[in-house]
Image (cartoon, rainbow, N blue to C red):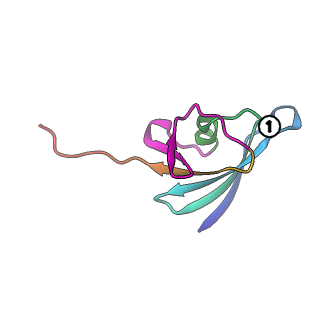
Amino acid sequence: MQRERLRQEPALGEGMRVTAEIHPARREEVVELGPSSTGLDLLRALHLAPDAHVLVRRDVPIPADEPLADGEQIRVVAVVSGGLGA
């Protein structure tokens, strides 16, 4: 799995590091975020659209406004929809 580091400026020198496992790209990125960051902050740091991705913590989907914790591993899954129109 490919691993990259992204950085978003932490507030007041404090912050957290979150590992994002991105699917279906099968890559992993370590992101540095501010101390009270949410899933939405993670998606923004990754330059991913919130309405096109689902965040998963320990096999459970979480809302984008869910607070994250330092050291967490979050799976970011691209949502694909479609089908035949009526």
Can residue 71 be found in the magenta stretch? no
Question: Which corner quadrant of the image does residue 40 belong to?
Answer: top right
**Looking at this rendering, what residue extends furthest in the left direction?**
86
Q: Count of labels shown?
A: 1
Question: Which corner quadrant of the image does residue 1 belong to?
Answer: bottom right
**Looking at this rendering, what residue extends furthest in the right direction?**
13
Can residue 53 be found in the magenta stretch? yes
Tell me if mark 1 has few (under 14), some (14-19) or many (20+) residues whose alpha carbon lies within 10 angstroms of its own: some
Determine which residue is flagged by label 1.
10
Residue under the point 50% across and 47% down: 60
Residue under the point 56% across and 52% down: 58
Q: Is residue 77 left or right of residue 7?
A: left
Q: Is residue 1 left or right of residue 4?
A: left
Q: Is residue 25 above or below residue 13?
A: below
**Looking at this rendering, what residue extends furthest in the bottom direction?**
1
Q: Under tag 1, what secondary structure?
A: loop
Q: Where residue 22 appears, x then y in whole percent?
A: 54, 55
Q: Where residue 6 appears, x then y in whole percent?
A: 70, 50
Q: Between 19 and 83, which is closer to the camera in this rendering?
A: 19
Residue under the point 58% across and 56% down: 21
Q: Give the residue type at disc 1.
A: Pro
Image quarter where the C terminus lies is: top left
Q: Is residue 38 above or below residue 2?
A: above
Q: Where residue 5 appears, x then y in whole percent?
A: 71, 55
Residue numbers of the magenta segment = 46-69
Q: Between 11 and 72, which is closer to the camera in this rendering?
A: 72
Q: Where residue 83 appears, x then y in whole percent?
A: 21, 46
